[in-house]
């Protein structure tokens, strides 16, 4: 009976693991870079900003896959490039919609984690 329970628990754990990994696929390095950048811009004490910035990237990761986040942030950051190179991003067909999605996603995560606007 004990073996059956531990086997059932093990199977449940194995079945749940791929789902959790698929819905939260942000690499550790990307999370660390986000948190460090967020902390640099934060006006709060280092300890508070670390927790709030970590919460923020977790909230973002819960809503979008990493590949989508990369696309959104690339377009949003690319429009600030001066000249022809930035023009490619500014002239994108759905660029403004992507930028709006990026900003709303960030704002929602900041509110959820009580991170003051930058």
Image: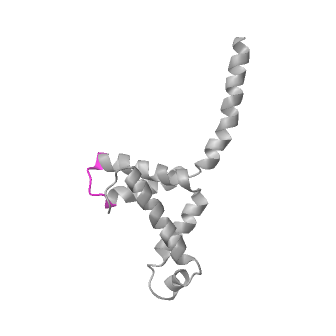
Q: Give the image location of residue 46, x and y in percent.
A: 29, 49
115 and 80: which one is in front? 115
Q: What span is colored magenta in the figure?
A: 41-47
**Colouring scheme applied when the structure was drawn:** one colour
Q: Give the image location of residue 86, x and y in percent.
A: 50, 82
| Quadrant assignment for the N terminus | top right
Task: Give the residue displayed 37% in from the left and 58% down from the top.
Answer: 38
Q: Residue furthest bottom?
A: 84
Task: Give the residue displayed 32% in from the left and 61% down from the top.
Answer: 117
48 and 32: which one is in front? 48
| Quadrant assignment for the C terminus | bottom left
Residue 49 on the magenta span: no
Task: Give the residue displayed 33% in from the left and 59% down from the top.
Answer: 40
Q: Give the image location of residue 85, x and y in percent.
A: 52, 84
The answer to which image quadrant residue 3 occupies is top right
45 and 93: which one is in front? 93
Residue 42 on the magenta span: yes
In the image, taking residue 15 as reference, residue 64 lies left or right, namely left
Q: Give the image location of residue 69, x and y in percent.
A: 55, 62
Task: Give the residue displayed 51% in from the left and 67% down from the top.
Answer: 101
């Amino acid at each position: 009976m004990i073996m059956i329970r531990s086997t059932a628990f093990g199977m449940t754990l194995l079945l749940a693991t791929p789902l959790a990994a698929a819905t939260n696929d942000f690499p550790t390095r990307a999370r660390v870079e986000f948190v460090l950048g967020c902390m640099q811009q934060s006006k709060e004490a280092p300890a508070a900003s670390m927790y709030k910035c970590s919460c923020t990237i977790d909230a973002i990761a819960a809503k979008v896959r990493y590949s989508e986040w990369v696309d959104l942030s690339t377009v949003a950051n690319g429009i600030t490039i001066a000249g022809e190179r930035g023009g490619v991003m500014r002239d994108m067909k759905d660029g403004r919609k992507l930028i709006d999605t990026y900003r709303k996603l960030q704002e929602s995560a900041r509110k959820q984690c009580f991170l003051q606007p930058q």
